[in-house]
Image (cartoon, rainbow, N blue to C red):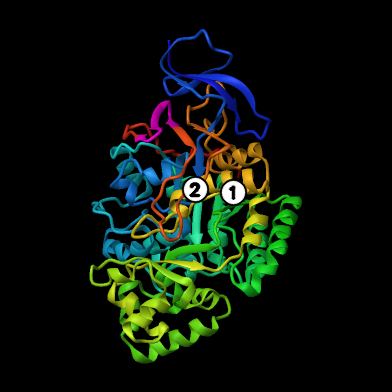
């Protein structure tokens, strides 16, 4: 007798092949049989009623790093069909974390990962992975090694180039992280302290990735004004390193830059034709979301949050920040210039005193407080000690659609879960399947499922999932392709999607209609490497 039998489903197996009718039998967390199994018995039987049965979705860009230590089941994620989250993004995440930097790092991450009530008692990637395991997550997780954390361990948060000796130390720390199970390296070249690194430093780390066969997952230094130049330098570097280049949340920001989208995709195609593996992830919305202090020029972050707050108290430095936010700097994108203050919405704050700001644009807050918009923004960061999140409207629908259509893409929700979040935290995967596949026919269902399942599994080295095949792990989603759709909006973001009936993690039913089960079903994946050099 099987543990679970899924009958009468339309199988979309994750390979990109056309769907077919079959039943799926599961035992001991694995797919035991696929075929016509109507006479077979099981402890639990699900009638899929000719709905789509697919592999569980893999979210290639998440910020659940701290929340997962407080909530073993994050319903906003799993109800989208997500059975695996990739943590450690943008070069600034949970681990490694030297004890002397815990307080500083908590403040630095507050606007991105929130401030859940957890104990920060880990130091290495290995420690952090074990802590997640002890919390018995209800779905799967994998961890990237963040460049900023590695840099912080070696040389703190100073705004200066690394010495040759410090680069060697960073290389050693990266090797340790990978040997402890990290599935790649992330960096965010707009975030402290990654933004202080020279390309020489990044290239030395990427040489290690080429050796291990692991990807660089990168928030590049420009996603608008200098996006083409940014891509060129990265592609050239990664060709020298022989490593996989994966762009985080690929997009083209700022009205004056939207015409570049075709050139962006052509650069990816050309690099692939030249033999460099280039992939990306994307969320399907015209607005981004990150920590509000990302509006500040890089030098303002030198030394960490405490030093940044001191600069915000200095009138001459405030004036300099305001002027540079208006004009931007070479090598640095100004989000406030792209979006305008009326295109930035505050999503979260730390204090009750400023709670009225949540859900309002900076322009609206400035009108309430009787100040200029720029001064209002700086005052808010200072008052909340950097614990502020934002949504920024910087993209257009045509660019989003063109990127959705590209076969090298995967999906990443990039969901910040605090306050009044961006709707992508609740709706990214159903939105793509409902809006872009069913309604707008940007690509086929089978192709998009491949890009949500087997493609991300291959990128991060998950060999036992991403495809519905006998012997593979039973991460499975059952959904109605005719009704699946996101319900989360910018006005009311905390709404679950419609059309997903079941989510199964390692053979256990975690979502059954309106019911969600906190079962210790999830794994934390560690990657074993066969080194190339």
Does the stretch in magenta take in 508? yes
Crowd around label 1: few <14 · some 14–19 · many ≥20 (10 Å): some
Which SS class for mark 2?
A: loop
Answer left or right for 111 relative to 52: left
Answer left or right for 227 relative to 82: right
Q: Which residue is mark 1?
A: 435
Residue 486, numbered circle: 2
Quadrant position of the N terminus in the picture: top left
Magenta: main secondary structure equals strand
Q: Is residue 157 above or below residue 297?
A: above
Find residue 37 and report its image quarter: top right
Asked if the residue under mark 2 is in contact with the one under mark 1, i.e. CB atoms within 8 Å, the reply is: yes
Q: Is residue 25 above or below residue 251?
A: above
Answer left or right for 3 relative to 337: left
Q: Is residue 283 above or below residue 189?
A: above
Dot 1 or dot 2: first in sequence order is 1
Most foreground residue, 158 or 33: 33
Question: Where residue 115 appears, x then y in whole percent?
Answer: 29, 58
Does the stretch in magenta take in 377? no
């Amino acid at each position: 007798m099987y543990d679970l039998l899924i009958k009468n489903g339309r199988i979309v197996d994750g390979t990109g092949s056309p769907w077919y009718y079959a039943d799926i039998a599961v035992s001991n967390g694995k797919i035991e049989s696929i075929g016509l199994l109507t006479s077979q018995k099981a402890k639990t039987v699900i009638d899929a009623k000719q709905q789509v049965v697919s592999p569980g979705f893999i979210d290639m860009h998440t910020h659940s790093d701290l929340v997962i230590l407080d909530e073993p089941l994050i319903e906003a994620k799993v109800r989208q069909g997500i059975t695996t989250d990739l943590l450690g993004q943008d070069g600034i995440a949970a681990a490694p974390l030297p004890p002397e930097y815990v307080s500083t790092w908590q403040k630095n991450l507050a606007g991105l990962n929130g401030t859940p009530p957890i104990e920060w008692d880990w130091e290495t990637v290995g420690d952090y992975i074990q802590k997640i395991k002890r919390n018995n997550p209800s779905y799967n997780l994998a961890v990237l090694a963040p460049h900023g954390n590695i840099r912080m361990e070696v040389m703190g948060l100073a705004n200066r180039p690394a010495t040759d000796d410090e680069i060697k130390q960073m290389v050693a720390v990266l090797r340790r992280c990978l040997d402890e199970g990290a599935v790649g390296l992330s960096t965010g070249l707009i975030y402290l302290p990654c933004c202080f690194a020279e390309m020489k430093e990044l290239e030395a780390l990427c040489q290690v990735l080429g050796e291990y066969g692991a990807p660089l997952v990168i928030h590049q230094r420009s996603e608008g004004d200098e996006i083409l130049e940014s891509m060129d330098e990265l592609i050239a570097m990664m060709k020298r390193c022989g490593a996989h280049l994966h762009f985080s949340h690929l997009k083209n920001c700022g009205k004056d830059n939207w015409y570049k989208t075709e050139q962006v995709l052509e650069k990816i195609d050309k690099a692939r034709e030249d033999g460099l593996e280039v992939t990306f992830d994307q969320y399907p919305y015209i607005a981004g979301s990150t920590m509000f202090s990302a509006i500040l020029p890089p030098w303002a972050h030198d030394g960490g949050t405490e030093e940044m707050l001191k600069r915000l108290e200095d009138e001459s430095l405030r004036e300099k920040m305001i002027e540079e936010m208006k004009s931007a700097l070479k090598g640095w994108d100004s989000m406030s210039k792209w979006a305008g203050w009326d295109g930035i919405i505050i999503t979260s704050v730390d204090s009750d005193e400023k709670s009225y700001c949540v859900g309002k644009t900076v322009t609206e807050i400035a009108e309430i407080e009787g100040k200029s918009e720029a001064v209002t923004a700086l005052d808010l960061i200072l008052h909340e000690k950097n614990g502020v999140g934002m949504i920024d409207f910087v993209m257009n629908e045509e660019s989003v659609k063109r990127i959705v259509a590209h076969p090298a893409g995967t999906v990443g929700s990039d969901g910040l879960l605090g306050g009044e979040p961006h709707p992508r935290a609740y709706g990214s995967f159903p939105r793509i399947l409902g809006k872009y596949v069913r309604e707008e026919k940007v690509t086929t269902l089978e192709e998009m499922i491949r890009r949500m399942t087997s493609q991300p599994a291959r990128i991060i080295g998950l060999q036992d999932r991403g495809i519905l095949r006998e012997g593979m792990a039973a991460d499975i989603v059952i959904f109605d392709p005719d009704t699946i759709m996101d319900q989360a909006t910018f006005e009311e973001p905390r709404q679950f999607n419609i059309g997903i009936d079941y989510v199964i993690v390692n053979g256990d039913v975690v979502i059954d209609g309106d019911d969600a089960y906190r079962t210790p079903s999830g794994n934390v994946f560690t990657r074993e490497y066969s080194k190339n050099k």
